[in-house]
Image (cartoon, rainbow, N blue to C red):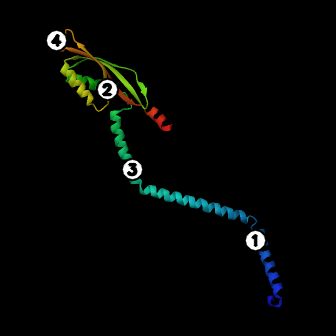
Amino acid sequence: MLERLPFWGQVVLMLALAVGCVGIAYYLWPNLKQKGEEIATIKTELEDMNAKILEGQAIERQLAQFEQEVANLQRKLGDIQQILPTDTETGDLLRWIKNMSDQSNLELKTFAPGSLKPVDFYKEFPIEMDVVGRYHDLGIFLDRVSKYSRIINVDNLRMGSNQGGGDKTIRASFTATTFVYDDKAAAGEAQQ
């Protein structure tokens, strides 16, 4: 039947069929353009998710390294907390000072903790101390204090003679300052 039509008739008939197919397609699927846009959006989301999956897989391959790094940092934190604890630990400090003064043949007369003084990410914890003994024994005591695992600064050292103390010839007063880590202040500094 197509062969009987002239060439221009065949072209018109083909165009009519094409327009008819497009019309039927729009009638049957009126939101075809929206579906195409949705498909493009879903493809973009899929590409993003695939990129995130690849990133996660790369991180997963490094997990053992990250765990080792965390373990090292926790060990370092433990070491640092011995030097700069998060609590004053006054009782432990008093026992240690008393033990060191006894070993150094000094008599601990006064151990008066002061109030905490905030400084940056730590607090100073001053302790007024008064000891009686011999000059050489005081030197031994101060040497032992300098080797303590926790930081202790000794300042305002005042020495005088001890009247009526027998072989304990000097009386020394000083401020022993130790330090306490202030995690709240450090967290505030880190956020700034």
Q: CA distance from mark 2 to mark 3?
A: 37 Å
Number of residues whose C-alpha sits closer than 10 Å to that of mark 4, classed few (under 14), some (14–19) or many (20 or more): few
Q: Earlier in the sequence, mark 2 or mark 1?
A: 1
Residue assigned mark 2: 153
Q: Earlier in the sequence, mark 2 or mark 4?
A: 2
The residue drawn where x is 35% and y is 41% is 76
124 relative to 36 in the view: left or right:
left
- Picture quarter containing residue 3? bottom right
Residue mark closest to the camera, 2 vs 4:
2
The residue drawn where x is 80% and y is 88% is 2
Q: CA distance from mark 1 to mark 4?
A: 115 Å
Contact flag, marks 2 and 4 (Cβ < 8 Å): no
Residue assigned mark 3: 67
Residue mark closest to the camera, 2 vs 3:
2
The amino acid marked with disc number 3 is Glu
Which labelled disc corresponds to residue 166?
4
Residue assigned mark 1: 25
Q: Earlier in the sequence, mark 4 or mark 3?
A: 3
Classify 27 as above or below 189: below
The residue drawn where x is 57% and y is 61% is 47
Q: Earlier in the sequence, mark 2 or mark 3?
A: 3
